[in-house]
Amino acid sequence: MSEPKEQGSTKLWGGRFAEGTAASVEAFTASIQYDARLYRYDIMGSMVHARMLARQGLISGEERDAILAGLAGIRDEIEAGTFAFRPELEDIHMNIEKALTDRIGPAGAKLHTARSRNDQVALDMRLYLRDEGRELDRLLVTVQAAFVRLARRYLGVVMPGYTHLQRAQPVLLSHHLLAYYEMFGRDRDRIADWGRRMNVLPLGAAAMAGTGLPIDREWVAAELGFAAVSANSMDTVSDRDFVLELLFCLNLTQLHLSRLAEELVLWSSKEFEFVQIGDRYCTGSSIMPQKKNPDIPELIRGKSGRVTGALVSLLVTVKGLPLTYNRDLQEDKEPVFDALDTVKASLAITAELLANTVFDKDRLLRATHGGFMTATDLADYLVRRNMPFREAHGVVGRIVAHCQERGIELADMTLEEMQRFSDLIEADVFDVLSVQGSVNSRVSTGGTAQAQVEEALRRAEQQLGMV
Ligand code: ARG
């Protein structure tokens, strides 16, 4: 059993305690190792809180000024790396408050008026995550821009489009690349939407029931850039929806990156040889001298596991909690910090990787030959001659089987050979059997025809301000 560390508690909350906390308990409950990263937001919130207290006559102008100067000094020390964080003070809130009181005396002890760590930590997290949301948007734009640049560079290049990882229909490489532009665009929308919902001031809920002191929450909200104040003090201190929602957003982004990573792994293999990833963005093998491995995409794909873990971890933490604040909620931080670090690093390296990836146009074109990729075009050709689609599907199926037997492609057949399967087929059939003809026939909105893709590319460039 661990012995009490001291007689009588020296904690900021120690009044009712006859004995000090066991060292093992201090070590177990401390969060300062990771919540120190919230310092800037903790100080920002405290500064506005102090100014509000003075406006409301709860502290004097001199006390306010002492608090503001003290907090600014602490911020400078933390930024200079000279601030001594103390685990026995548990978390970032009490480390800063204790340092403030040590610096400025009694005025420091007034800062926590009409406030609890329960609404304070909710405020710090909202302020911190709001900034992180902006950074995520910036990184998502760099990835979108990398795709747009590639789509512009390779405009006109054809490749096989796949379903079930089987060659399906020819498409433009740019069409494939712009699919990712759309995905990351939805990620941006999702974060903007989350940002609107989370931008609500929690401060003023106090421990959980509100406060009897005459505070001005609306003023604090306006000063800190919040669009509203929270409506229910109990909900305010127990709510972690805004963390969970962001974790889900992060999961979808990492999942998109992971799907891209999988394609890059496949495409850079000898089996495909669609892309060459620059030497500076690959690694070698310690035993096989010939190897050049796509470790970056593999790690991005691998890291999606921990991002999913973070979401699941917090879902399970919150699941059985009664209202309102419970210490369990401290466990929201490490998962969301780790998920943010992981996704931001993955986005940044992906933008670089894409800028250092070269596609092999000839190889992509050659891959569209073989695999009967224009079979759907042949069926559509028959439909245009009034054959019901199901019937046309059957006719072309039989033609494909015939070609397979003879070891030839659709375009290698003679007209007479084809006419044995349907007398609707005429000499103009060869136009639809070419890869270019197939691609450019797909003019439906969102289709892969060159005109459609050029239009989509222009729109993307405009959206990103690249033109
Ligand atoms: N470190 C705590 C957290 O992250 C701060 C709030 C603690 N509140 C309390 N009453 N113990 O949740």
Image: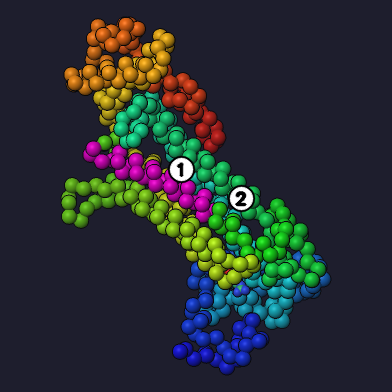
Looking at the rendering, which quadrant does residue 152 occupy? top left
Mark 2 Cα-neighbour bin, 10 Å: few <14, some 14–19, many ≥20:
many
Mark 1 Cα-neighbour bin, 10 Å: few <14, some 14–19, many ≥20:
many
Rendered residue at 64%/81% (across/down):
13
Residue on which the image places disc 2: 195
C-beta proximity under 8 Å, tags 1 and 2: no
Q: Give amino acid for label 2.
A: Gly
Magenta-colored stretch includes residue 294: no
The quadrant of the picture showing ligand 1 is bottom right
Of 27 and 283, nearer the camera is: 27
- Classify residue 34 as left or right of residue 225: left
Magenta-colored stretch includes residue 268: yes
- Classify residue 209 as left or right of residue 24: right
Tell me residue 357's x, y (percent). 34, 40
Classified by dominant secondary structure, the portion drawn in magenta counts as: helix
Rendered residue at 61%/59% (across/down):
126
Res. 143 mark? 1
Q: Quadrant of the N terminus?
A: bottom left
When the figure is inspected, residue 303 is found, relative to residue 406, above or below; the finding is below
Rendered residue at 64%/49% (across/down):
196
Of 298 and 348, nearer the camera is: 298
Of 66 and 142, nearer the camera is: 142
Rendered residue at 76%/70% (across/down):
211
Q: Give amino acid for label 1.
A: Val
Q: Which residues are magenta?
A: 246-271
Q: Is residue 43 visible?
A: no
Tell me residue 375's x, y (percent). 33, 20
Some atom of ligand 1 lies within 8 Å of the CB belonging to the residue at label 2? no
When the figure is inspected, residue 56 is found, relative to residue 461, above or below; the finding is below
Question: What is the secondary structure assignment of the residue under circle 1?
Answer: helix
Res. 462 mark? none
